[in-house]
Image (cartoon, rainbow, N blue to C red):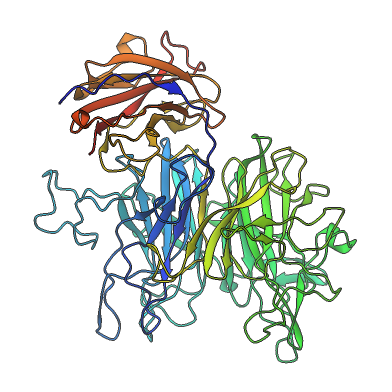
Amino acid sequence: MHRFPAIVLLAAASAAAQDHIIPFGFSANTGGNGGTSSMPAARIKDNDLDGQISSVTELHSFLTTAFYAGTNAQGTVLPQICFMTDVRAVVVDGEYEFYFTDTEQGRIVRGVDKNHNGLLDRGEDANGNGVLDPGEDTNLNGILDTEVNEFVFFGERTNQLNLLAPDTLAVYRDNTTGRTRVYVALDNNSDPTFGFVRGIYRCVDNNGDGDAKDPGETTLFVSSTLGLTVPGTGGPVALNVSDNWTQLRCLPGGKLIAYAQGNPINTGNPIQPSMNAFYGFTDNNGTAVPEVWFNCSNLNSLPRHPDWVNGTYPDWDASYGTGLRNFARWVAVAPRGYLGAIPAYYIASSYNVVTPPNTSSNPGDMNLGGQHVAGLIYRVVDLNQNQVIDPGELTLYCNMSGQTYAGVAPVGFTNHAATLITSLTDRTWGFDVSADGEVSFIYANGVADGVVTMRDLNNNNVIDAGEAGMVWAQTTTTGPLSASPFFTYFGALADGTLPGPFPTGITTSGSGCLVPSTGMRALMDSWGGPPQVGNLSFKIGSINGVPFTIAVWALGTGLIPPVQLGPFGFPAGCTLDIDNGTIQGFGFTDAKGRTIFAAPLPPNNALIGLTATVQAGVIDLSVPVPLQYFTTNALVITIQP
């Protein structure tokens, strides 16, 4: 390899929008059978650190493989299609383990970014069928090496082309057992191929082979057939005759939260005693112990939250034609959402203002008290961390309703067209919060769908004017999503925890060390575009370090087999991955644990083709070794024309 010119790097203080993983369903097709796009899921990341995410250049295909559905019950051979609706991620061995619902094909897809390039690659599975076919074993190890695999296959409907379930899932990493629990809501309304009935399933990879398809690994956890009951206002209430679960999420302690969506209440549909409420389920070795976790509706026979009984907040039961409907469903969980240390839970509805109300397809958001209730986001600060919403723990966090409630004034946000949005006249299609507490939702915004984020910058427990904004928007007529994707749930990652995606000219090597204080692997990243001559904005650096500490970086001439550094006084398991590495400088990590070094590339064509390797070390003083630097993986950088 050629020697990369030594460039003086300076620590760069930067802010960035959060990192988002967005599953896609594509409606540009016939027969309602999903789309044929090659982008089952996208990743949007603020690569240039300007606080906004470009519609085209900063959107990447994140999940680069799906699975062939094979032959359906009618004997039709289906193409490689998918309709992704939800994604969850947990940290396993210092890196993210992703789970997706593919509602088109009735399966759960699992992915791990093993090469740390910020994408879920197909690897050796050239045709994406999940099987080691002839010629695919390129490294001759007898294993299909790929970053994506089928975790569970529920099967297709027996009387239609597609299952359209599962729609939502929740994931919890049990560090005591070393297993990941995946909860999946299956709401198909006809008999599926493999005998799975409606309800919530518990899926655990007990034998460590990467899936939950072996006997006893996928079991029915919640269903009206299991005889579960909860206390009601007039006695025990049987749970849940329709098994229509519209969102699942897990709290930091492992409790499963699920919203039970009810039918509109009118003369033909009486009140459903167990519907329109958030339930909590404690997992007792595979047995669900239910409770009413949060109820803000009168359209059931369940106890309501005290703040709804006393009228502090408006009910979410909205007028719907000649009847009523409760259209809440959003819940999001931040393990360190309050002051960076205390769990916070966020609850919202998916209402939107409709003028005049289109009661045939949308209930609007006007409740019986004449109050607009779209755009109300509540926060629960779980001070005692008991996974219960105790009195006084719930407050109105963000008010985008246009009316003042509980002393909280309404706020708005500016969309991609520089228009101030003060009322949600279109639907919020997804809702999530990053682990460190930045709340986001996808807003269907006329000709563009966008991601709106908010953060309580002054820590006054409410979103004030200027603390919410649209960080990304995608038109439906141009750009990589011109095929009109269907948005549902999505995932928000804390910025600076997943590297890449890397531009042309950068590849990765190695695994990086697990940093004890962050629980994540120290990894290299880059920002500001490709390593191209004349790119004065190019930056490199490390992520997942301890905030406000020190990182060093080294420049080498090539890659070498990993050298264990433990015998030399470094933490056990850390390696040197670059040849002739020389320390070039140091910097301080920011509040996100990143050290970002400016590496401007001059407009000198003589640099084209020069290649170098870069590796960093981040300090963690919690480990009693002489040299407390945890090494990253390596970047191989080749300067581009």
Image spot of residue 43 (x, y percent): 42, 52
Task: Left or right? Give the position of 512 relative to 390.
Answer: left
Q: Quadrant of residue 572?
A: top left
Image spot of residue 472 (x, y percent): 52, 54
Q: What is the count of numbered marks?
A: 0
Asked if 283 appears above or below 499 in the picture, the reply is: below
Task: Left or right? Give the position of 369 relative to 147.
Answer: right
Image spot of residue 350 (x, y percent): 65, 67
Asked if 385 appears above or below 82 in the picture, the reply is: above
The N terminus: image quadrant: top left
Q: Nearer the viewer, residue 385 or 513?
A: 513
- Residue at 70 percent of width and 87 percent of height: 269
Q: Nearer the viewer, residue 298 or 224?
A: 298
Image spot of residue 91 (x, y percent): 46, 41
Q: Quadrant of residue 51?
A: top right
Asked if 466 appears above or below 538 in the picture, the reply is: below
Q: Is residue 473 visible?
A: yes
The C terminus: image quadrant: top left
Task: Left or right? Give the position of 244 relative to 32.
Answer: right
Q: Quadrant of residue 156?
A: bottom left
Q: Nearer the viewer, residue 516 or 630?
A: 630
Q: Is residue 216 visible?
A: no
- Residue at 29 percent of width and 19 percent of height: 6
Outermost residue toward the right?
Answer: 310
